[in-house]
Image (cartoon, helix red, strand yellow):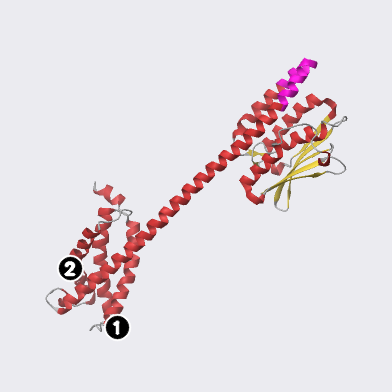
Amino acid sequence: MIALKLSTFPFRRMARDFCYTMVFNVACALVVTYVLRGNGSFISSLIISTCIGTTAFLLIDGIRLAIWGEDARPNWPVFALLVFACAPFAQIGGGWLAGKILGYELKALFSFTSPGAISSLVLTLIAAGCATVFFAHREKVMRAEAELAQEKARTETVARQALQAQLQSLQAQIEPHMLFNTLANLQGLIAIDPPRAQHMLDLLIQYLRATLVSSRAGSNTLEQEFAQMDAYLGLMQIRMGERLSYSLDLPPALRAHEVPPMLLQPLVENAIAHGLEPKIEGGHVTVGAALHGGALALTVQDSGRGPAAGPGKKGTHVGLSNTRERLRALYGEHASLTLEPAQPEGALARITLPV
């Protein structure tokens, strides 16, 4: 039981309080020596003040922490009685210890009928009272800071949960958008070419199996992201045949770099739906990643009609807008998504992320 109490006693808090107590001891020594014009030198006054003040501190603060603990507020009337009760013991014990250090007995501190003992007791009570007020105010400030920190933590938790919900909502809008388009293409292919439809269905199952876990994760490696785009573009190539070709450019040094999941999906989908599908001859899609000026650039370039031609087919218009919202929620102003004409033709979508 004793070991348990010692293990829970706030020794670190008491050590911090002792540092402030030493400041009060020096202040009392200065008052006794230079204000009250005591008989001894400053050093002797400092020794006496330190011994009495430290004894009072050990009694008062030790009992306070043992009874009320580190965080609870003490019962102030009871605590005031504790200060008055401990002051005489502190004067006697501290005076005896100071006498041992100085090499002579401080008899004036032990007789409470003498003016010197009464003056010393009054000074001890005043110092203890000032220290009590100081520690009470300090605890109030510390308690307010702790409550402010807890409130800030709660606010950050709520904001983080709201951000997570927002990202999940945005991502949930993108994934059905891709799946609906793929299933619609598969439905049309079943009627005209069942073998190719079966092959496309097999690829779709592989694609969904590969992306199910990563699409629900907080982040993807670029290697996973590019593997998903390879599977998706393979699906589109089955549907479009020779009208679609593609290439992936991922440097080995960037394969382990983490990015938000499903980040490239809407850009590749837009390149096909609005850039290449409306062209009779189709075209080429290049997905790349590179470092430029301390930032990560992810690009999707197609040789289609270009952004000035407008949308090639009716869509839900959530791809680019939701990607921008995800980037803004995750990176603030440190990330961007741009869409511009490519050279010599087509469109270039570029995502810039901080490294």
Q: Choose the circle earlier in sequence order: 2 or 1.
A: 1
Q: What type is the residue that disc 2 sits on?
A: Pro
Looking at the picture, does residue 171 appear above or below residue 18?
above
Looking at the picture, does residue 142 appear above or below residue 129?
above
Q: What is the quadrant of residue 341 in the picture?
A: top right
Q: Is residue 106 left or right of residue 133?
A: left
Q: What type is the residue that disc 1 sits on?
A: Tyr
User: Which label sits on residue 7?
Assistant: none
Residue at image mark 1: 34
- Regarding mark 2 in the picture, which secondary structure is present there? helix
Give 40 or 212, whichever is nearer the viewer.
Answer: 212
Image x and y of residue 231, in percent: 72, 29
Per the rendered image, the range of residues in magenta is 181-201
Give 198 or 342, whichever is nearer the viewer.
Answer: 342
Residue 198, magenta (yes or no): yes
- Regarding mark 1 in the picture, which secondary structure is present there? helix
Image x and y of residue 217, in percent: 59, 36
Query: Residue visible at 70% across and 50% down?
Result: 295
User: Which label sits on residue 88?
Assistant: 2
Decide: few, some or many residues near mark 1? Use Cα within 10 Å; few <14, some 14-19, many ≥20: few
